[in-house]
Structure formats: C-alpha cells, structure tokens
Image: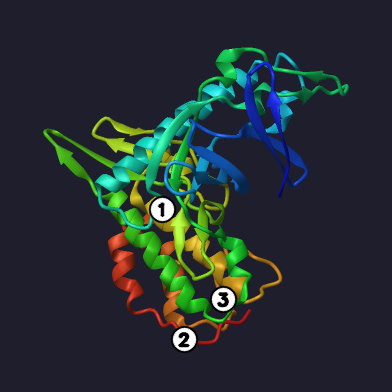
Amino acid sequence: MKTTGRYVDKDLKREIVEFDYKGRKYRFPAVLGGRFEPRKILCIGGFGIILVAKDKKIFDRNVLIKTGVLPPHLFLHPRNVAVEKEVAANRKRMEHEKKLLLHGHYRGVGGIPVLIDWIDDIDPGIRGPHRDEKGNEFFRTEKELWNNTTYLALSFFDGVELNEFCGKDRFKRDILGASRTLAFYLANTLEKFHQKQTFGQGYLCFVYQDLKPGNILCSKEGGYQLIDFGSFAVVTPKGPSNTGIGTEGYIAPETKKLGKKAITPQLDVYAMGVVLKECIQIGAGAKTVKKDEDFLNWKLPDPWKRFLAKCTNENISDRYTDMRQIRSTLYDLPVKGDVEP
C-alpha cells in the first residue's frame, strides 16, 4: 500500500487523498469531518475498509477509520443500478455496526474498538473517476450516492489479520498458548454479546454469525481484536434480524436446515472451533489447511483434540452450548506440548 498523491477536486472543492492497495486506487477526503486525516490503508475485506488516520483535534493521535467499500465491477457501466442498492446496503450496515459498538460498551465488553466518533462525509471513491469496459472515463454524478457516506472513527489498534499472524514466529513459538489466549478472548467477548438483557417483557442479545480469521486483528504482542460488528444478528422475542450473514466453511451445518431458528450462541461456538483449527495448522506449518481437520493423525495433546472436536461437532446436542462452557474448559487445556502434522 502506498499513497499515490493528493489533488483538489474542483467540482467538490475538496482536497482528496488517493491510496494504491493491491493494484486498485482508493480515494477519500484528505480531512474527514474537519478532524481526521487518512494516512494509509490498514486492511480491506468483506467487512469494509480500515484506514489509519491522524486525529487533528487531539494531538495527532492515531485512530482507525472504518467505512464500507464497493467492489470495482459495479463501476464498469456508467448507469449500473446495482450501485444504488449497494450504497444503501453499506449505509445500513455501518449504522448497524455503530449501534453494536455502542451496545458492546454498554455491556462492558472489553477488547473491542472504542467508538470515538462517526462522520457523514463525501465518498470520492463512489463519485469517480471510473473507467467503463471500453476504457472511457466517467463519474457517478448522482449526489445522493456519494454525499452521505458514514465513517466510523475507532480507537487505534496496530495489527494484522489472524492468518498472517499465525504464520509468524511469535505464534509458532507458542502455538497452544497463543491459541488458548485467542480462545479466551473470543469466549469472553462473545459471551457478553450472547447474554440476554431483559427489559419489561422483552430481551435483547446478539450472535456474531461471521467469525473468521479475516475479522480478527492481532498485534505483534499477541493481543486480539474483532473488527467487524456489522455481522451481528439481533435476537429479540420477535425473532432474529440481520441474519443470513456468514462465510462458507465457518457456518454451522444446522443453518441449512433450521434457518433463523439456528441463530444461537452455538453458531459462534462452531465458527470459533474452525478458526482455532486453522490457527493451529498454520502455526505448525501444515502443507494444506483444512477447516474440517480432525487432528486424529496429528501430534497434539488429547485435551485439545477433544476440545476442538466438541466445538465443531455437527450435532448441536454434542457441541458446547455456549461460551461459558468453553471458558470453563479452556483452563484445563495445556499450553505446552508437541504440535505436528
């Protein structure tokens, strides 16, 4: 990733900063909301895009800026109506994420980003310029598409995505210890979101749905942080909403049969088991990383084999029911022992 330059958009009368990330250009206001200056792209994924920025209001401290990002194929035609739908979906998702972060802090969840501010500003990446399939330059001139994009300003966390971290020496030297630390972090964090909070005749709780390595950042010191809060399902007595989110390979098998009735903490239990399986395989240098690895032929302490098997059991009656059960089991897992394919 590198900064390719700054320029003044004469039509918008705004300075724009442009970054190059993996061969694609991304554009943002040089100053968001009169306060935050984007400096570089930290990461991009299904969750959106995260920037590192300077907070000009408070001593140029580092913060993270998160917003949605639209796939480039949407801009191969000047009048693609799908852009309007995706812009609306992105706005809804960012609003949902903002609410979940606030709920997390209300519930006393530690180890999640602090929501510093949220800003509605222009999105020059939507406006353009773009190039169609014939190479002709065009702009999306509909102001309603790019004039009201939500940016979330979050507390700074310097990290890389989980799979990248698991391939580093810091993790490889302590595979079981680091995996148990990750499991404790996920269990403690998600348990508080899973808890039903009652009010009057109702209740409210949340299920993450899309737990995967790409949604977890890791610092070089071995700290962890979830980065996508738009994937949470909201569960009330009327049933769950914001459902149907997930990534193949991490989705518990019962969702295909039960649909919305499957939105329980056991979805996150299953995905957590798959994530831990991947981490252990990457750290141990497995030639092929399998989400359904059973470790039967591995050198791995038996308590870990039993734990991972129970997390990812396809039969929900034989799987851990919630994060509290997982947390109580984690204390008994060894942090030393051979880990070899």
Q: Is residue 163 above or below residue 52?
A: below
Q: Is residue 315 visible in the rendered structure shown here?
A: no
Disc 1: which residue: 268
Res 203 quadrant in image: top left
Disc 3: which residue: 170
- The one of 100 and 55 positioned closer to us in this rendering: 55
Q: Is residue 245 above or below residue 272?
A: above
Residue furthest right in the image: 134
Q: Earlier in the sequence, mark 1 or mark 3?
A: 3
Q: Earlier in the sequence, mark 1 or mark 2?
A: 1
* Mark 2 crowdedness (10 Å alpha carbons): few <14, some 14-19, many ≥20: few
Disc 2: which residue: 336
Q: Residue 221 location, x and y as percent?
A: 50, 71
Amino acid type shown at disc 3? Arg
Give me the C-alpha separation between circle 2 and circle 3: 15 Å
Q: Is residue 272 visible in the rendered structure shown here?
A: yes
Q: Are marks 1 and 3 in contact (CB under 8 Å)?
A: no
Residue at left 46%, top 38%?
A: 152
Residue at left 63%, top 18%?
A: 12
Residue at left 50%, top 87%?
A: 337
Q: Residue 151 location, x and y as percent?
A: 49, 34
Q: Residue 5 location, x and y as percent?
A: 73, 39
Secondary element under disc 1, as helix, strand or loop, is: helix
Res 181 quadrant in image: bottom left
Q: Is residue 286 above or below residue 251?
A: below
Give me the C-alpha separation between circle 1 and circle 3: 26 Å
Q: Is residue 323 left or right of residue 53?
A: left
Give me the C-alpha separation between circle 1 and circle 2: 26 Å
Q: Are marks 2 and 3 in contact (CB under 8 Å)?
A: no
* Mark 3 crowdedness (10 Å alpha carbons): few <14, some 14-19, many ≥20: some
Q: Nearer the viewer, mark 1 or mark 2?
A: 2
Amino acid type shown at disc 1? Asp
